Amino acid sequence: MGLKLRRLYRAFGVIGLALGLTQCGPQPVEPAPAEPAVRIASLEDLLISGRLIVLTLDGPTIHTTDTDTGAPTGYEVDLVRAFAIDLGVSVRYEVMEDIESLLAALDAGEGHIAAANLTVTEERARLHAFGPAYRTVREQLVCNDNGPVPTQFDRLPEARIVALEGSSYLDTLQTHARMLGGLVWDEAGAGSAMPLLEQVQADRYDCTLADSHLADFARRRLPDLVVGLDLSEEQSLAWAYDSEIDGLGEALETWFAGAHATGFLEELDERWFGRFGDFDYVDIAEFINRVETRLPEYEALFRLAADDSPFEWELIAAQSYQESHWDPDAVSATGVEGLMMLTLSTAERVGIEDRTDPRQSIEGGVAYLSDLYRRVPESVTGQDRLWFALAAYNVGMGHMYDTRALAERLGRDKNSWADLEATLPLLSDPEYYPSLRYGYARGYEPVAYVQKVREYRALLEANRL
C-alpha cells in the first residue's frame, strides 16, 4: 500500500526533513490524568516528561473529533501534532469552554501552550506571551444573504448582530459603536464563531463576526453566508504559551521559522482551506446537496479503492465529482463514460469491462491515476506531484512532459506546479505549441480541472467535520 496522501497534506514528512524529525506518524494523544499536572520550569523538563499539554477550544478548524476515527482533528491539531513530533513528545488536549477560561487556565499553569486560532490583540499581548504568527486574518462581518447585508459601516445598526463572548470581536464592535449611534449586538458563548455562523445561516441573526479564514471555511458548508464588510486590518494568529517555562518561547520561534521556510504552513492551509476561486453559490449549494443525496451510495467504493492506492478517499471522491457529478451513467460527446469518465482505451488498459458500473469505474479511475502518479518524474515532490498527476489525467502525460520542457525553456521551475500551472495555457498558443513534441492542447483545461478538484476536496472535508 502506498503512503497515504493524507499524511502528505498534514505535512509531517515535509517539515520532518527540514527539522530533523525521526518519525512521520501521528503522536499519541493521552487521556487527561486524574490529578492536575505539576507546573514545569523548563523545556528540558517538558521533554523529560514526554508530554505537551495543550489548551484549546472546540471548533472545526481548531479541535474537534474525526467522525471516522474518533481522534482529534482540526487545523490547530495538525499544527500541534507536527510540533510535538519535532519535540518527540505526546500530546494531551484540554478543551476549554471559551477564550476567557482558556487564557485563565494558561495563566494558572494548567497547560503549556494555548492553540485556538487566537488573535494577538494589543491587550492580550500585554497580558500573555505569544509565539510567532502562523497566519494573518481580518475580522469580517458575515451575514445571511437573505437578510440585511451591511456593506457600509453606517448600515451596521440595521442588522441583528451576534458576537462571540470574550472575543476580540467585541473590541471591534465597541470601536464602531463609539462612532455609530444605535449599534447594538448580542453576545453568545462558544468555543469558536462557528456555532454563531450556523445561527446566521439558520436566520436567527442577520450577521456575526468571524476571522476571514473561518468565514471562508464556513461558506463552503453554509452557502447562504456572505461577507458584508472587513471590520479590521490584518491581525496575527499565534499560540499563547506559558512564559514561565524556560526555553519554550525559543523552541516555538525555531519551529515556526522552519514551518514557514519549508512550506509546511502553506500546505496546511491548502489541506484545510483549499485554494478557492470566486465563490459560486450555485455550485457550492449543488455540491452540498449531492454530498447528502448521491455520495452515500458510492462512499464505501471510494474508501475501498483508496485503501490500495496512494490517495485519500476524499480526493478520489472529489475527482469523481469533477468528472461526473457522481452520475454513473454520465457520458460525454467524446465517448468517455462513468463515474470516473474513462475512455474506452484507458478502461481496456486497466482491465475494466463496464465503464458504467460504479465499482469498476472507480477502481479503473484510481488505477489509472495511480499509474500516472508513479510516472511523474521523481524530481516533482510533495503536493506538486499530485497536481501533476491530476493534470495528466485530464490532458495526458505527453502534454505534461511538453509543459515541463516549455517551462524549462522559459526559465521556469519545471518541478513546481505553480510554474506549470502558468505554463500549461501556452500549449494552445501558436507561438509555442508547433515546437512541442505532442503539439496543441487546450492547456487551460487541466489548470481549471486541478483547481476544481482541489476545491471539491476541501469542500468535502469541510462538510464531513
Image (tube, rainbow, N blue to C red):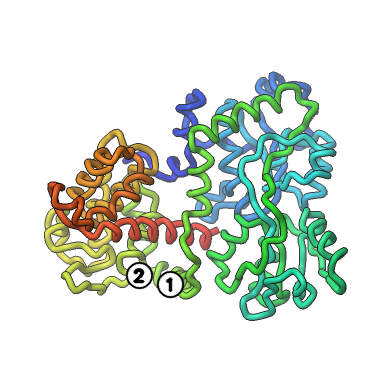
Residue 125: quadrant of the picture: top right
Q: Which residue corresponds to mark 1?
A: 290
Query: Residue at the location (38% across, 46% down)?
Result: 418
Tell me which residue sits at (26%, 73%) in the image: 330
The residue indicated by pointer 2 is 325
Residue 61, position as x, y percentages in the image: 60, 52
Question: Taking the image as drawn, is residue 111 in sight?
Answer: yes
Q: Residue at x 43, y 41 (%)?
A: 8
Q: Residues within 10 Å of mark 1 (few under 14, many from 20)?
A: some
Numbered circle sitting on residue 174: none
Q: How many marks?
A: 2
The residue sitting at the front extreme is 431
Q: Are marks 1 and 2 in contact (CB under 8 Å)?
A: yes
| Quadrant in which the C terminus is drawn | bottom right
Label 1 SS: helix
The crowding category of the residue bearing disc 2, from other C-alpha atoms within 10 Å (few below 14, some 14 to 19, many at least 20), is many
